[in-house]
Image: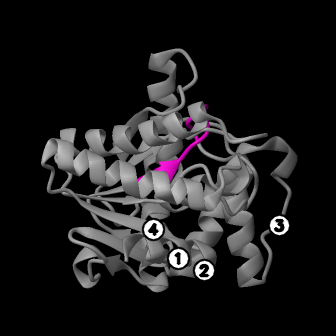
Amino acid sequence: MNQSEKREYLIRSLLRERPEYRDAGVPRDEREQKDLLRALMNVRPPAPLPEEYLRIEGEYLRQATEEKGITRLEDLTPAEGDLYLWQGDITTLACDAIVNAANSGMTGCYRPCHNCIDNCIHTYAGLALRNYCDQLMRRQGSEEPTGRAKVTPAFNLPSGCVIHTVGPIVAGPLLPRHRQQLASSYRSCLSAAEENGCGSIAFCCISTGVFGFPQREAAVIAVRTVKEYKAERRSGIRVVFNVFRDDDLRIYRELLG
């Protein structure tokens, strides 16, 4: 199968799962097909998948990521010591661990084609990630508390693993507990990474965007917490601050000199 044939196979497989979509057709346009596949993946609840589906999905997603272009940590230049600043798509970064800004349900974003990091990571990792997270949460028996971290395989992403953390949601004034919770997310991720043998970790901008944490304050906490952790633990873990927007890039450049 080529990429187009794999995409159509995946779309038809997911459409057949839902009685209301069984008679739906596959769009001819490639962009519409990609959007439909992503939307179907996003809304699918956790459930077992046939091995053939997982195999073809994996081949399709890995090639799609390669076509976007994979960035390796070794190709980056440190901004300060063993701290890196990189603007790009975290789902294309090859390092030991990448961080996902998750919600408390921990099984990904269910909004079709939403552009949040949680949606992007679950989309390009594949549906096996949602199923894995669902099993973790069933064993836990409750929602994930703010400020902790869970490690999962990366499945079809080029990173070694994904570390999921729930950052604080700021719906009004920024409070001391928000700052403490955000710092806890960074420390929990660093600790989880090292406990799992990771020598490098890439952080997204946890809790900014739809979670409402002011960008500059979040960046200050991120950089300070990482530096304090590394100093206290005498840790040699390499840390990438991953940004997507230009304004975040400017803020981190100022903080990292």
**x and y percentages locating residue 14 in the rendered image:** 67, 52
Residue pointed to by mark 2: 246
Alpha carbon distance from label 1 to label 2: 5 Å
Q: Characterize the local packing of mark 3: few (<14), some (14-19) or many (20 or more) Cα atoms within 10 angstroms.
A: few
Which amino acid type is marked by label 1? Leu
Report if residue 104 lies within the magenta region: yes
Q: Secondary structure at mark 1?
A: helix
Q: Which mark is residue 249?
A: 1
The residues tagged by marks 1 and 4 sit, at their Cα atoms, a distance apart of 9 Å
Residue 205 visible within the image:
no
The answer to the question of whether label 1 and label 2 lie on touching residues, with beta carbons closer than 8 A, is yes
178 magenta-colored: no
Is there a contact, CB below 8 Å, between mark 1 and mark 4? no
Residue nearest the viewer, comparing 101 with 26? 101
Residue in front for this viewpoint, 141 or 66: 141
**Pointer 4 or 3: first along the chain:** 3
Identify which amino acid the numbered label 2 is placed on. Asp
Mark 4 residue type:
Asn
Q: Is residue 76 above or below residue 196?
A: below
> Which residue occupies 60% across, 80% down?
246
The Cα atoms of the two marked residues, 4 and 2, are separated by 11 Å
Nearer to us of marks 4 and 3 is: 4
